[in-house]
Image (cartoon, rainbow, N blue to C red):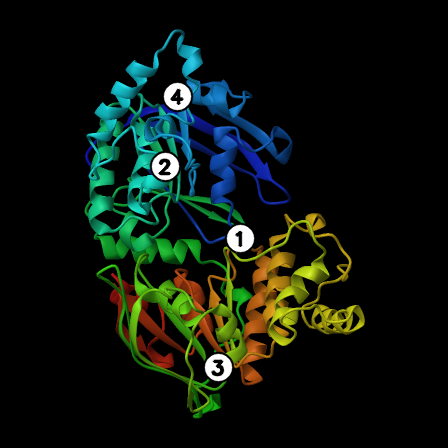
Amino acid sequence: MNIEINKNALLELCDLQFDSRTSFSWKMETGRCVGLVGLSGSGRSRLLKTIAGIESRKTYKGKILFEGKEIKTLAQQRQECGIFYLPRDPAFVDRIQVWENLFLSENLSSEGFFSKNSIYRDAEKLLSRLPVEIEPSLYGFQLDERQKLWLCLARMFIRKRKLILIDESTHQLDASDLKIFYAMLENQIRDGASVLFAIPNLVRDVGLCDQFVILTQQGMKVWEPDDQEESFTRQLRLEKLRNVDDHLFPPKRSVESLSTEIQFEIKNLTYESDDKIVLDHINLQIRKGEIFGLTGKSQSGRVKLGLALFGEYLSAYRFGKIILNGKEIEIRDAFHAAKSGLAYMSGFRSHFGVFANQSVGYNLDIIYSRIYHRWSLLPKRALRNIFKHYAKILRLGAIDYATPWRRIKDDHDCIQKILLARWLALHPKLLILDDPARGMSASGRRELYALIRELADEGLSIIFTSSNLQEISLLCDRVAIFEGPGIKEVLTSQNIDLKNILGVVA
């Protein structure tokens, strides 16, 4: 993207420090499109929220300067100064009309007199630029997911912005929509905007940026690529720059140490929903005690396979076989999947059944009780014994059965351990982990990786899904790389490294 860069600093971070991490300083020049890169838990979202004014001033040390002046105002006032923040999952209200949803985050009263008719006309004009047809008079619940996503993305184009902060908001866009969105974003940059963009996918999103900021547990690195550098070379360089935590992983296992017994098998599994192929002729064999990795571009089948195995896409047309311990099983819903010996845990903790007003013990017990005593909870003594057993294995420390969930709601490491214990209590034969280290600290990730290896060594078969190629290359025994709804290639232990994986994904 050839856009003239103004050397004057638009944004300046001065000795910024979160918690006990290393402080960092950085200047962002006007006209830049900067990619914010880092592993889950590196602080990308937190940095964007801090610049946007959503994080409290008490949560960090240092100064943030915008156009040469320190900003101490609230988020709404920063937006009026030209700073616009687009979160990963933007707010959307089903019960109000499209034109109201479009201007949901705008403080229209600051502009003096305004009328509903003029706002409605502005909404019509803006919506006409989108690649989807949306009527301003429709209600939110009448839109499909693609229309809702584009409506939220369109908010950044409502008025002229000086600084646009994007927190992985493009992760749901397919390739054609992403191309259109980037063209619209380039027009904003040509009109004087600067962009700080938390990149959701290195394979798709590196071409837009002219500078990269890499966040790690040790601080910040800045890298400015050569304009002539190929996309693949950029991706490989960024993967190596952001992956500085090799010491967190247990040593790789030798091929000879793995069992030859097939524990889980998928034969020709295909799902079709609404005339779209969700999964296309998937064939896999997973050995007892094997950590089998799934990766690929976002919107590929890598995440959908795990969801399908745990009862998602119930209305989809399906054929193929799922075989566990030599017997074919029929997955009718999540309950039946769990009863059959499958377990599923996601790194997106808020989406998967946390009861925030209950105790830690209740959140651990709820699935165990429903599986083995479907209509009643087990006696408290039995449940406490189960909790004590897994609290010791997972090193939960001072957390006990009666600890209120609200006390640990911000401790991502502890929450993930408890949710893992919830499934281990069922003694599954196959554990499906979808980006399990998301948002965890370095020490929490080290413990999680060690536990995954221990479980595999004890004979538990594991499907490990991740977009983090370092996790895939250092933890998995084999890797299936998805392209669209199907598997493009399976790499064996001898061929698993960053360069080979990225070469197939790209």
Kindly identify which numbered label has been placed on residue 253. 3
On residue 140, the disc is 2
Which of discs 3 and 4 lies nearer the camera? The answer is 4
Q: Earlier in the sequence, mark 4 or mark 2?
A: 4
Where is residue 255 shown, x and y percent of the image?
Answer: 43, 87
Residue lying at the far top of the rendered structure:
113
SS at badge 1: loop
Of callouts 3 and 4, the N-terminal one: 4
Q: Earlier in the sequence, mark 3 or mark 2?
A: 2
- Above-or-below relation of 323 to 417: below
Question: In the rendering, which numbered label is found on residue 82?
Answer: 4
| Circle 1 Cα neighbour tier, 10 Å, few/some/many (<14 / 14–19 / ≥20) | many
Between the residue at mark 3 and the residue at mark 1, the CA separation in whole angstroms equals 26 Å
Q: Considering depth in this image, is 417 or 315 the residue closer to the camera?
A: 315
- The answer to whether mark 3 and mark 4 are in CB contact below 8 A is no
Asked if residue 175 shows in the view, the reply is yes
Give the image location of residue 259, x and y in percent: 47, 91
Horizontal side, residue 355 vs residue 392: left or right: left
Q: Which residue lies at the image location 42% right of the left edge and 30% below the top edge?
A: 27
- Disc 3 element: loop
Amino acid identity at mark 4: Gly
Name which residue type carries label 2.
Gly
Give the amino acid type for the residue marked by disc 1 in the picture.
Gly
Quadrant of the image containing the N terminus: top left
* Residue 439's disc number: 1
First reached walking from the N terminus: tag 1 or tag 4 = 4
**Number of marks:** 4
Picture coordinates of residue 221 (x, y %)?
Answer: 44, 45
Instruction: Say few, some or many: other residues with alpha carbon within 10 Å of mark 4 (under 14 / 14 to 19 / 20 or more).
Output: some
